[in-house]
Amino acid sequence: MPTVPRALREPPPLDARRRTAPPSPRTALLVNPFYPKDPHASFGKHVLTPTLALTAIAGATPAGWSVRYWDENLLQGHPPSDPFPRVVGITVHLTFARRAFELARWYRDRGATVVLGGLHVLSCPDECAPHADALAFGEGAQLWPVILRDIEAGQLRPRYDGSYQRPYTADPPPRRDLLDRRAFLTTTSVNATRGCHNRCGFCYLSTDGLKVPYQCRDPEQVAAEIAADGQPYCVFTDNNLGSRPDYLRDLCLALRPLGIIWSAAVTLDVTDDASLVREMALAGCTGVFVGFESLTDENLAAAKKKTPRAAEYARRVGVFHDHGIQVNGSFVLGFDQDRSGCFEELVDWIEGVRMESATYHILTPYPGTPLFRQMESEGRLLHRDWTLYDTAHVVFRPRHLSVEELAAGYEYCYRRTFSHRCIWRRRPGDWRAVPAYLLMAYLYKRSNWLWPLLIRRRLTHWAWRPLLEASRWRHLRFRRRLEVRGECRARPGVPVTAGV
Ligand code: B12
Ligand code: SF4
């Protein structure tokens, strides 16, 4: 098993003896808590692009308040305490809930008011409530200004409910200026849409009580936000940017004049219409993150995944490749029809279709989802230690595999996919795209020894920048050929594609 340096395994200890000044009026601190990194995956993936959770709510901070952003995963040591914040907002996911609660205690003990929000608050409110002065359920940009005003008026309520019904276009732009640009490959993480037309049984979108109607922002508004951040590469962190093909087409038209490159998570059905994929390429799309999940149709059906069946996958990967778009496939391991042998078969297939990148996730029943209820009712949950619900650990009893076989299969998939041999075999067919592909693969997937240093010294953007610029330049040339000749088989090459 590859080792993980301590700084990526454990959060910095909180100094119990630190003396702090009284809370400074109208100051807020927003914290993204530390989570342990998976030794099999790239350490670099955590500094590709920031989560929008906190910059989105920071954008809604009322005038007169100062707000600071702190991401513990940037390895900058003890979280800030000078000036000591009046209010601390912490985003909570199940995997880092324990750390979020530790932080909450530390700040509360010293007089700050702590507000918790995010997915875990929604799925496990009773667990979160004792650790906060107030809980924010759902859409935070709507709630944050109300919470701060109530604090000023001394009228803080224990619970605030935000609905996802308000027009998405009404949200203020995220405060990307709070981020350290050196610390990420790109600070331009953007959401153009919210929700997804699917409701896969394992997805957090099917959590009880979470009602996220599908909403799209004005394409021009999205393009202006991207242009304002001034970066060559943008990552769409939407659940599924391809949920509404007509919208995606309009968005592409708005993005085209920017001359940037971008990547996004989409479902495979965007390849139903090759002309849409062409529009994406012409607008700067160089990579897609696609949840293939499984090569077994029974698994897809059981998960209620409404995308093309497995026999169609290879042809559809080809549609992206034909338009110069690299594919980062996401695969879930441990479905009920997975048996020993499925891991070799999967990586053989990935190698065969020359998929540029792949991420693997052990099936994980998130609390509140149909999958969780099923596993619970069948008595298959092994424990409720949420820190291990990170898709890198087996937390349930698989149907046709032992727990050990599934864990070993996960490790095998990563080890083999990022072996020298497999990286080479998956190289693009167009030799001109090979150098960028190899640089990307080696920097991203085979440099875990280097990432802690790059992260701590805030050299992430510096390390990626030449590759980003070279990819954008190649892409612009490729686009010109695509415009003239129609479909084209050359691949421009891209640093990394979006996705978790
Ligand atoms: C960007 C991203 C990442 C980035 C950054 C993650 C980080 N925490 O820093 C990277 C690539 C590093 C990453 C890694 C992983 N991720 Co991730 N990631 C995302 C992604 C695509 C976007 C997040 C985002 O910006 N959302 C948009 C914001 C605006 O929405 P939001 O977070 O819900 O926040 C709103 C409200 O919840 C609320 N709110 C949130 N916090 C707070 C706090 C306060 C005080 C208030 C008032 C309100 C509030 O207001 C916000 C604005 O409306 C999401 C999918 C998605 N589209 O959301 C997955 C997602 C969050 N990731 C997920 C997972 C599983 C992971 C990994 C564990 C995967 C893996 N095996 O490696 C890792 C490890 C991270 C971890 N342990 O949490 C899951 C989480 C599932 C769950 N139930 O917890 C998601 C939902 C993807 C999915 N479809 O399953 N991820
Ligand atoms: S397609 Fe993806 S985002 Fe949509 S419900 Fe399924 S897993 Fe979730």
Image (spheres, rainbow, N blue to C red):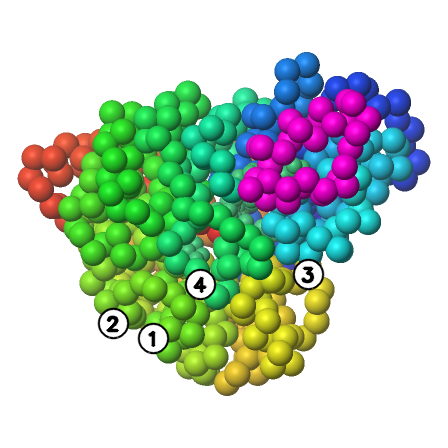
Q: Which residue is mark 1?
A: 297
Of callouts 4 and 1, the N-terminal one: 4
Q: Which mark is residue 311?
A: 2
Residue 374 painted magenta: no
308 relative to 175, above or below: below
Say which amino acid is labelled 1: Asp
Residue at left 49%, top 29%?
171
Say which amino acid is labelled 3: Trp
C-alpha span from label 2 to label 4: 20 Å
Q: Which residue is mark 3?
A: 386
Left or right side of 444 for 134: right
Whether residue 309 can be seen here: yes
Specify the segment rendered in magenta: 134-163
134 relative to 378, above or below: above
Of callouts 2 and 4, the N-terminal one: 4
The tally of labels here is 4
| Tag 4 secondary structure | loop
Of callouts 1 and 3, the N-terminal one: 1
C-alpha span from label 4 to label 1: 14 Å
Mark 2, Cα crowd under 10 Å, few <14 / some 14-19 / many 20+, is: few
24 relative to 171, above or below: above
- Indicate the quadrant of ligand 2 in the picture: bottom left
Mark 3, Cα crowd under 10 Å, few <14 / some 14-19 / many 20+, is: some
Pointers 2 and 4 in contact (C-beta within 8 Å):
no
Residue 284 screen position, x and y as percent: 27, 35
Residue at left 34%, top 75%?
297
